[in-house]
Amino acid sequence: MEPVITFTTDFGTRDGYTAQMKGVVLGICPGARLIDVTHDIRPYAILEGALVLNAVSRHFPEGTIHVGVVDPGVGGPRREMALNAGNRFYVGPDNGLFSFIFDSCQPWEARAISNSDYMLPDPHPTFHGRDVFSATAAHLCAGRPFDLVGPPIQDPVRLNLPQAFQSQDGIRGQIIYVDRFGNLTSNISAQMLTRKARSIEVGNLVIQGIRRFFGEVSEGEPLALINSFGFLEIAVNMRDASEVLDLRTGADVRLLW
C-alpha cells in the first residue's frame, strides 16, 4: 500500500500554505498518498484541532503519518514533536495538539525534532508546518528511522482539558466543539452514560432523553444524541444549533438521570 500522510491545519485553503507543505512531502517521498483531513480548524483553536485529530486518525491504517498544525506559538520556545502511538505517527508542535492521543493510545513514544537531516535547510521561523513538520513526515514516510528524529520527550504538553464530572443527579460538562452544521459536541463521553438520561439542560433549553439520529425529531426541533466522535451532542434537526440556540464552546451542559 502507498504510504499515507494526512494534514490537519488551521491554514484554510486561500493562501497556498498547504500546497507548499504537500510540495515538500512529494519532493522527499514522491510515492506518498496525501490526504486532507481539514484546513478549517478555527485559527489558533488547539483544542478543536486536538479533538478532530483524535477522532479521525483512529480510522486510518497503522503506519499512517498525521501532520497537525495549529501552532500559535510557531518560532517560539515550544518544541517540535514527532509521536508514535500504536504505530500511527503524528508530527506537529508540542503545544497540546496531541493531548487526546496521549490518553487514547498507549503506550506512545514522543521525540523532539532536532535532527536537521529531517528538516528543510534553514527552516523559516513562521512556517514550521512546511519546513519542519512536513519534511519530517516525508522522511518518515520514506522509511527513515523514527528514533533518529531527536531525543525522547517524557513530558509532552497536554491541554488543560475541561473535564465532565459525575454528580449525584447526573453529569455536568460543557460544549467543546461546534462543527460546520452548527452541531454542538460536549465533553460528556458515551462511556460516562451508565444510566438512562432523563433530560439534558443546555442554555435555557431542556431536552428530553437521548435520540439515536437526527430524523427521530421533526425538522427544526432540538435533540441530544451520541455523535460519531463518541460524545453527547446537542443539535437541531436540519438547522444550525449554535445559531438557533445561541450557544458556543464553553456553554454548560447538564445531563440528569
Image: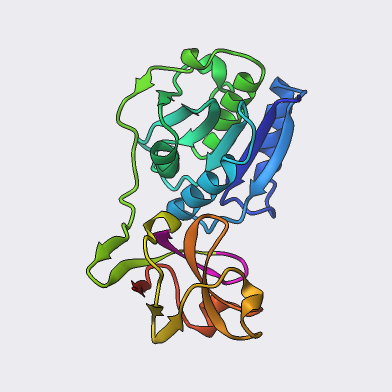
Q: Quadrant of the N terminus?
A: top right
- On whether residue 103 falls in the magenta region, the answer is no
Taking depth in this image into account, of 128 and 108 the one nearest to the observer is 108
Q: Quadrant of the C terminus?
A: bottom left
Residue sitting farthest toward the left? 168
The image quarter containing residue 247 is: bottom left
Q: Position of residue 189 (x, y in %)?
A: 42, 57
- On whether residue 180 falls in the magenta region, the answer is yes
Q: Position of residue 16 (x, y in %)?
A: 70, 46
Q: Position of residue 231 (x, y in %)?
A: 47, 59
Q: Position of residue 150 (x, y in %)?
A: 43, 17
Is 153 situated above or below 144? below
Is 207 situated above or below 4? below
Taking depth in this image into account, of 49 and 60 the one nearest to the observer is 60
Q: Is residue 138 left or right of residue 250?
A: right
Residue at 57%, 40% (x, y): give it: 58
Residue at 73%, 27% (x, y): give it: 32
The way the protein has been coloured in the rendering is rainbow
Taking depth in this image into account, of 41 and 18 the one nearest to the observer is 41
Residue at 69%, 53% (x, y): give it: 13
Numbered disc total = 0
Magenta residues span 179-189
The image quarter containing residue 238 is: bottom right
The image quarter containing residue 176 is: bottom left
